[in-house]
Image (cartoon, grey):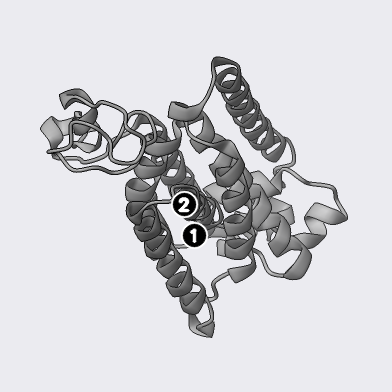
Amino acid sequence: MCPNCRAFITTSDKVCPYCGERVGARAIDVRSPGEIAGGLIPHAYFTTILILIINAGLFIATWSMSRTFGENPTLWAFGGKFGPSIFQQHEWWRLITAGFLHGGLLHIAMNSWVLYDLGAQVEQIYGTPRFLVIYFLGTVGGFYLSARLNPMVLSVGSSAGLMGLIGAMIAFGVANRSSVGRAIRNFYARWVVYIIAFGLIPAFAVDNWAHIGGLLAGFAMGYVAGIPARSSYSREVFWRASAGVCIVLTVFSFWLMYRHFPSPGQLR
């Protein structure tokens, strides 16, 4: 990947054919496997792995509690999206906490697989601060649209944030006006078609409104965010500060979830 314009180039290129930047061996190796486990784990990035660990920990906690109180009451207690709780009880933190919860082993396994691969790619292209903002706003945007258009259904899952990342990759492909950019845009556009089509199957009970909301928010953020290689110092300070705000809001949301956690009698 070119260190200047982030376009994908071949290993034989000494000068980027898109922007004219001279590249060296270190720039060519940007997309090489990560250092974890001697390269056995490709594209290993701290932020992506951390989100996976948080999701797994919350899944274990909700799975254990759901054996006593049932799945839906447990997911609601841990901050699942539910329209009346958000708009009538003003529990806006549910728009964030819902993105870290999952309703079953297959649910978290599929989302973790996508996050492990896609999250690392987005983090590599956009950098960690933008990645965090895109993922955060994809989650909030997805569950907000779901709460508005599908309010009476309890909804959870990291797929809203994942659709935000997909939207950002499509935006990157749109902004990168090259054959590689078109390939990236078309590749992830096909992902969107597959995911939305999968969500139309009633048996899987997929929240497509959360997917659509996350996709739109991610595309908008990806389009306006730009990439670090084309940025200035002041813009990078802004994105680091924005990422910090997203982290603080996420931690605060889980603290509010803890404060509002219902008693066992309220869950029965």
In this view, the residue farthest toward the right is 88
Give the residue drawn at x 47%, y 67%: 192
Q: Are marks 2 and 1 in contact (CB under 8 Å)?
A: yes
Front-lying residue, 198 or 128? 128
For label 2, the crowd category at 10 Å Cα-Cα, with few meaning under 14, some 14 to 19 and many 20 or more, is some
Kindly identify the amino acid type of the residue bearing the numbered disc 1.
Arg
Q: Quadrant of the C terminus?
A: bottom right
Q: Is residue 201 left or right of residue 154?
A: left
Is residue 110 in view? no
Picture coordinates of residue 247 (x, y %)?
Answer: 59, 29
Q: Secondary structure at mark 2?
A: helix
Q: Camera-side residue: 44 or 152?
A: 44
Rendering coords of residue 228 (x, y %)? 46, 28
Residue 17 visible to an observer of this rendering: yes
**Residue at image point 61% right, 64% down:** 212
Q: Amino acid at mark 2?
A: Ser
Residue placed most toward the observer, 36 or 52:
36
Secondary structure beneath dot 1 equals helix
Q: Which x, y percent locates residue 81?
A: 68, 57
Q: CA distance from mark 2 to mark 1?
A: 6 Å
Vertical arrangement, residue 203 with respect to residue 146, above or below = below
195 relative to 144 in the view: left or right: left
Residue 67 — which label?
1
- Snapshot quadrant of residue 205: bottom right
Horizontal side of residue 126 vs 211, given as left or right: left
How many labels were placed on the picture? Answer: 2
On the image, the x and y values in percent for residue 152 come to 75, 70
Residue farthest to the bottom, as pictured = 202
Quadrant (top left, top right, bottom left, bottom right) of the N terminus? top left
Residue at 69%, 63% (x, y): give it. 146
Q: Which residue is mark 2?
A: 64
